Amino acid sequence: MPNMSLKKNEMPSQDPNVRNKNFLEVALGYTEEQALDEAARCLNCKNHPCVGGCPVNVKIPEFIKKITEKDYEGAYQVIHETSSLPAVCGRVCPQETQCEKYCVRGVKGEPVGIGRLERFVADWHNAHVQEAPAKPASNGHKVAVIGSGPSGLTCAGDLAKKGYEVTVFEALHLAGGVLVYGIPEFRLPKSIVSKEVDGLKALGVKIETNMVIGRVVSIDELIEQYGFEAVFIGSGAGLPMFMHIPGENLCGVYSANEFLTRINLMKAYKEDSDTPIMPLAGKTVAVVGGGNVAMDAARCSKRLGAEVYVVYRRGMEELPARHEEVEHAIEEGIIFKTLHNPVEIHGGEDGYVKGMTCIQMELGEPDASGRRRPIEIQGSEFELPVDCVIMALGTSPNPLIKNTTPGLEVNRKGCIVVNEDGLTSHPSVYAGGDAVTGAATVILAMGAGKLGAKSIDEQLSK
């Protein structure tokens, strides 16, 4: 009997006034009872529109039906057919704009909590199944993957399942890319990422860390000297953007990339960290930007004891961050100063940030992106007393690979140009994820990784 409740089961979570002082996971996950109740809301409708909304085409009604039958491992295997990172996707995918957006139940109520059910299934598998997946027989072909973020790991996993000998080259000392250096522990525990990476290793994927491709070895050398028959570039977009206003070179001004990398990868919030950040307890922090990265930086700053402002030039309705992340930030005591924009950062004689001049904005006509263009209100400048400024304005691809790979075409933003199959202008070199699109979502990067794997397989299996 379907559960015809118009509302999805709430996700249990830590109390806001407790979680804003720790880095433990905020969302606690469904209980078995909640998962069964939520799964019963799925109508298993004929056309399965939710599947079309998933960039990796998870068989959503099929895995949810397995939950209703209490076959949780069967549900996991259905998801794993098309997704190499179920526990990750269940936590950080923007389901509200993808699979859940097309759920029939959302027409007259809330959609089925697809992401919450995916997380439940993946967590059940990780808690109850210790047996590693069997390594497929080798087909004799070698493929290199540059970058161990979501696109690279997905490409590597899909190829490994087909018997390819895959080596992933990661610039940092730990595999996971943005999953480990960008997304905070309280949203995505690093033990989850490690577990997913271990699953890929069991399939035969080799992970080489501390390998900066373009410095240690070039793409041409991977092909000509190391015998890789194809290369997939999934190196992400890690070059931060700045406003180029006075004072951005002061001590206490961070890019969100640096700030989050120090926090998430280097554990700067621990007293014995080798790469600390400035003490923020009792300080005031301004995070400039309105996306998910801005929310992550703001919420991390709050956990370090700061009073935190999010300064964004458009209004609350225009915030590009996930609605859930904005809600969590507000619950945790973060103050939103929307329709404001910095024009100058001030420092003291010691070279550290002492304040920031902001100007009020109003929204005009829509710009090329379709969003209403923010316009300065002349004479509305005011001083915001802050001790630290974090710029969360977006990122672009690092130019290193472009500059060391002759013939690799990029666009004016430095993103690698690919055709409909993910093939670059360089023979046998494919690319996907943020290196191609600029900063986007984990699941879109995974979709690009799947396309890259499919195209490489078609090329090498001819």
Image: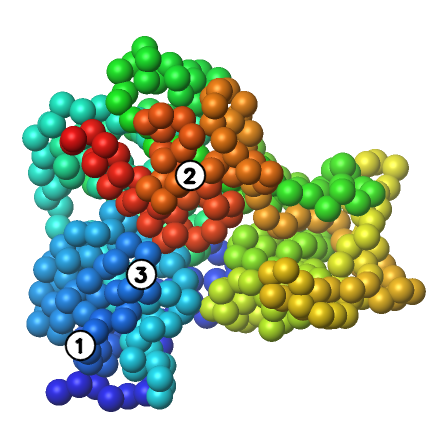
- Pointer 1 residue: 46
Q: Which element is circle 3 on?
A: loop
The earlier-in-sequence mark between 1 and 2 is 1
Q: Does the rendering let one see residue 130?
A: yes
Q: Which of 242 and 385 is in front in this view?
A: 242
Above-or-below relation of 217 to 98: above
Q: Does the rendering let one see residue 8?
A: no
Q: Which element is circle 2 on?
A: loop
Using the numbered discs, state the Cα–Cα distance from disc 2 to disc 3 in whole angstroms: 22 Å
Q: Nearer the viewer, residue 202 or 11?
A: 202
Quadrant position of the C terminus in the picture: top left
Residue at the location (42% across, 67% down)?
97
Q: Which of 237 and 423 is in front in this view?
A: 423
Q: Is residue 75 left or right of residue 95?
A: left
Q: Which element is circle 1 on?
A: loop
Q: Residue 326 carries which label?
A: none
Q: In this view, does 32 lie to the left or right of 357?
A: left
Q: Residue 54 carries which label?
A: 3
- Residue 167 placement (x, y as % from top left): 28, 26
Residue situated furthest right in the rendering: 379
Residue situated furthest top in the rendering: 225
Quarter holding residue 108: bottom left
User: Given the image, on which type of amino acid does mark 3 rest?
Assistant: Cys
Q: Is residue 366 left or right of residue 142?
A: right
Above-or-below relation of 338 to 298: below
Residue at the location (31% across, 61% down)?
54
Residue at the location (38% across, 59% down)?
93
- Pointer 2 residue: 418
Using the numbered discs, state the Cα–Cα distance from disc 1 to disc 2 in whole angstroms: 35 Å
Q: In this view, does 356 lie to the left or right of 21?
A: right
User: Given the image, on which type of amino acid does mark 2 rest?
Assistant: Val
- Residue 102 placement (x, y as % from top left): 33, 73
